[in-house]
Amino acid sequence: MRIGVIGCGTIARAAVEGIVHDGHEITVSERSTHHSAYLAETYENVRVADNQSLVDASDVIFLALQAEATPDVLGSLTFREGQIAITFMAGASLEEADALVRPARATAIMMPFPGIAQGGTPIMMYGDTKIVADLFGDRNSIFPVQNAEEMAAYLCAQAVLSPVARMVSDAADWLGERVSDKEQGEAFLRMLIASNLSALACEPLIQALNGGYNQRLRLHMEAEGLSTALKSGLSKMA
């Protein structure tokens, strides 16, 4: 495919790296020069262009802009009929993105995570499942949702990733003060969380960990208001 990427921040760069070896011709925008220059210098099939040249050279376009900048950036561009846009923008609905790229069509909204560069990450998306699966499905797990309301709920719930990373980082700091190799300690904790949550659903895992250190820490944190604070925070974003 001929793919263009408007807005080349950290997540867009990761998405490009996740598909760069699949034979696509990829054009990335000059925005976020550090990332776009790295991609063009590293991969023969990636080049940098201004936004209109990028649009002219592409059949599928990733919209990876900040939502507040989107009307100004896209409003100055001329799209053509038959082009497909996939939006990565959490702050704009699929319908809003679609209106900005006419006569092209925005057919899917998806939220990549940094792990998409290596594969093995979940991708929540709404809209045209086929185009997302064709591009990213071989290496990642696609989680399609039924409507915009479900997508909004998933967007809120995925925010648990940062607090979980904060908790693991804090636990790694605590462990690092007590062991000789702090980096090994953090690597152990990251693998511990990722592997066990991949293998078991949450409730069976909680039950399996009852009766020891895990239960004691969980009960302490619940008593301190962890569950209440989490659900309250999610509700405020919804």
Image (cartoon, helix red, strand yellow):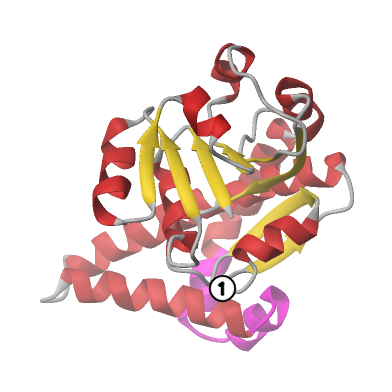
Judge whether 94 appears above or below 15 on screen. Answer: above
Residue depicted at 29% across the width and 69% down the height:
186
Image quadrant in which you'd find residue 189: bottom left
Q: Is residue 26 left or right of residue 84?
A: left
* Mark 1: secondary structure: loop
Judge whether 80 appears above or below 20 on screen. Answer: above
Residue 120 in sight in this render: yes
Quarter containing the C terminus: top right
Residue depicted at 15% across the width and 76% down the height:
179
Q: In this view, does 182 lie to the left or right of 136?
A: left
Please provide the residue range marked out in magenta. Answer: 200-219
Find out whether residue 67 is within the magenta segment.
Answer: no
Quarter containing the N terminus: bottom right
Which one is in front, 12 or 20? 20
Image quadrant in which you'd find residue 197: bottom right
Residue 210 in sight in this render: no
Task: Tell me how many marks there are.
Answer: 1
- The kind of residue tagged 1 is Arg
Residue depicted at 77% across the width and 61% down the height:
130
Which one is in front, 184 or 129? 129
Image quadrant in which you'd find residue 21: bottom left
Which one is in front, 158 or 221? 158
> Residue most toward the left?
180
Residue at numbered disc 1: 139
Q: Where is residue 88 in the image (x, y as percent from the top left)?
A: 61, 40
